[in-house]
Image (spheres, rainbow, N blue to C red):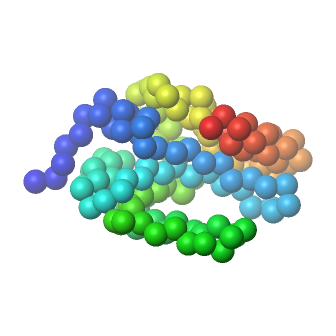
């Protein structure tokens, strides 16, 4: 039987384990937003799959932790690390944002608001303008500095 999660459970889980990302660099033309929830170990995978099934978008995959560029070290995990990720802007705009607008985050609400603004800039293709690109860089910096 598929795992059934209440909206309150999903919001609490995402508040604790979720991540709203804005990718914008001044030296690269590509910009995007991404939503991710991760969990270590096989026991957490069914929760991520239930969230994916609820939203009906995105993917659950095994995440690879990259080593440090400075030291060349690699991080070794004691168990698999899974992530539910959504990159597709249409899914973010039409599925995720309406859910988060109706079911409010507590801890990550300020991150969500920055991410939401960035998603709409991309959706409306304003990131291709000088002002839009500048705002994307500001949002990415603000999101990064808020952690």
At horizontal 77% and vertical 49% (from top left) the residue drawn is 127
Q: x and y percent of residue 37 in the render? A: 43, 49
Q: Quadrant of the N terminus?
A: bottom left
Q: x and y percent of residue 55 in the render? A: 36, 48
Q: Residue 104 appears in which quarter of the rendering?
A: top left
Residue 57 visible in this rendered orientation of the protein:
no
Taking 125 as reference, is 79 above or below it?
below
Q: x and y percent of residue 53 in the render? A: 30, 53
Taking 64 as reference, is 146 above or below it?
above
Would you say 136 lies left or right of 92 here?
right
Would you say 29 lies left or right of 90 here?
right
Q: Quadrant of the C terminus?
A: top right
At horizontal 54% and vertical 57% (from top left) the residue drawn is 87
At horizontal 79% and vertical 40% (from top left) the residue drawn is 138
At horizontal 52% and vertical 68% (from top left) the residue drawn is 75
Q: x and y percent of residue 141 in the render? A: 75, 42
Comparing 21 with 52, the one in front is 21
Would you say 89 lies left or right of 52 here?
right
């Amino acid at each position: 039987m598929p795992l059934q999660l209440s909206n309150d459970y999903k919001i609490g889980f995402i508040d604790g384990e979720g991540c709203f990302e804005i990718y914008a660099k001044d030296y690269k033309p590509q910009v995007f937003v991404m939503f991710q929830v991760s969990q270590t170990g096989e026991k957490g995978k069914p929760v991520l799959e239930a969230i994916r099934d609820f939203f009906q978008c995105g993917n659950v995959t095994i995440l690879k932790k990259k080593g440090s560029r400075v030291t060349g070290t690699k991080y070794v995990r004691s168990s698999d690390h899974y992530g539910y990720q959504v990159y597709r802007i249409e899914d973010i705009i039409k599925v995720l944002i309406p859910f988060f607008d109706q079911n409010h985050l507590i801890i990550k609400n300020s991150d969500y608001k920055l991410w939401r603004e960035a998603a709409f800039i991309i959706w409306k293709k304003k990131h291709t303008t000088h002002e839009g690109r500048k705002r994307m860089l500001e949002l990415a910096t603000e999101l990064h500095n808020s952690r």
